[in-house]
Structures are given as C-alpha cells and as structure tokens.
Image: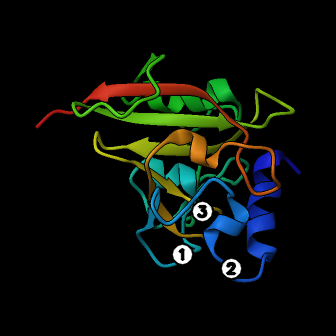
C-alpha cells in the first residue's frame, strides 16, 4: 500500500473531529470547508474538475467510477505529465497568482517520487479535496497541508501553472 492510500485510509478510519486535529496547521482563520464529505471523487479528480469518479491508477478502462489516463505512471513525473498535457507548465512560484490557474503536487517525505495529494488554485485561493471521503476546502497556503503526521501530505514537490483565459 502506497503513501497516498495510507493517508486516505487513515482519514477514513478517524472518528469525526475538527480538521485541525488531522492537519495541525489548519486553523479556523486559514481555511474554509466548502463541501460536505463526498466519497465519489478524490483529490486528483477534483483537481481535474471532476466530482463523479475517482482518478485512481490500476482500474481496468471503462469502469464508470474510476479513471486513469492510459500509459501514465502513478509517479510524480506521471502526475506532472497529466497536467502538462492540459497546458500547465512547471513554475517555481508557489504563491497564488491572480491571472493563473495552478496545480501543486505533494509527495511522500520518505519517497519523493510518490505523489500523495494535489491542490489547485483558481487564481484566488488554494483548493483541496481531503481524503477519499473528505471535505473540499479552500486554504490560504500550500504549507498548511504539508508535514509528516499520518494524515498530512508530505511536501509540495512541483507547482504548475497556466494562464486563465476567458
């Protein structure tokens, strides 16, 4: 079982408590819950604008509730390839930029090639789907979900951006 699955399963087994319990850097003044818990999608689906299925590798093509692009590895470079195919480019700027959509890919601290989470920005705020059955949240910075607690996502390894067009 990979780090991403451990993180998601850890969140699923936890009793209902404030998100701050699971993500110690979250406080009421730096994030907002934007959805009810929803098991139909995960963070990768959310970052790709889908809320009706999971983006999860290893499922046969055609499974309605699961999707993964063919010939894409479940690695940091694979996740980067998914977003560069959509017009995103790598950047070293981790801040929100009003004229850019952004994607931030988190990796496991013990295996920097293993993605654990992805967040997105619409140019105004960072947004994340927490866990496989968690809330969608808006958060002020990427570091709020970083760390090595069982439910934190490691570190941000890559940010990508593309210009917002009308």
- Residue 16's disc is none
Give the distance between the C-alpha atoms of the residues marked 1 and 3, in whole angstroms.
19 Å
Q: Are marks 1 and 3 in contact (CB under 8 Å)?
A: no
- Residue 38's disc is 1
Q: Nearer the viewer, mark 3 or mark 2?
A: 2
- Residue 63's disc is 3
- Residue occupied by mark 2: 17
The residue depicted at 75 percent of the width and 49 percent of the height is 4
Residue 14 in view: yes
Q: Are marks 3 and 2 in contact (CB under 8 Å)?
A: no
Answer above or below: position of 14 versus 128: below
Answer above or below: position of 37 versus 106: below
State the SS at label 1. loop
Rendering coords of residue 123 (x, y %): 28, 39
The residue depicted at 81 percent of the width and 52 percent of the height is 149
In the foreground, 27 or 66: 27
The residue depicted at 41 percent of the width and 30 percent of the height is 95
Residue 62 in view: no
């Amino acid at each position: 079982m990979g780090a991403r699955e451990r993180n998601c399963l850890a969140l699923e087994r936890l009793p209902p408590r404030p998100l701050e319990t699971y993500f110690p850097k979250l406080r009421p003044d730096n994030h907002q819950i934007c959805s009810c818990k929803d098991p139909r999608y995960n963070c990768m689906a959310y970052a790709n604008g889908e809320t009706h299925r999971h983006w999860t590798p290893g499922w046969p093509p055609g499974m309605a509730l699961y999707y993964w692009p063919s010939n894409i590895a479940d690695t940091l470079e694979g996740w980067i390839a998914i977003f560069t195919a959509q017009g995103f480019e790598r950047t070293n700027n981790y801040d929100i930029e009003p004229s850019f959509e952004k994607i931030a890919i988190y990796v496991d601290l013990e295996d920097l090639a293993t993605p654990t989470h992805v967040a997105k920005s619409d140019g105004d705020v960072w947004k994340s789907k927490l866990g496989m059955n968690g809330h969608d949240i808006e958060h002020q910075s990427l570091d709020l979900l970083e760390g090595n607690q069982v439910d934190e996502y490691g570190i941000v390894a890559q940010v990508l951006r593309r210009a917002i067009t009308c």
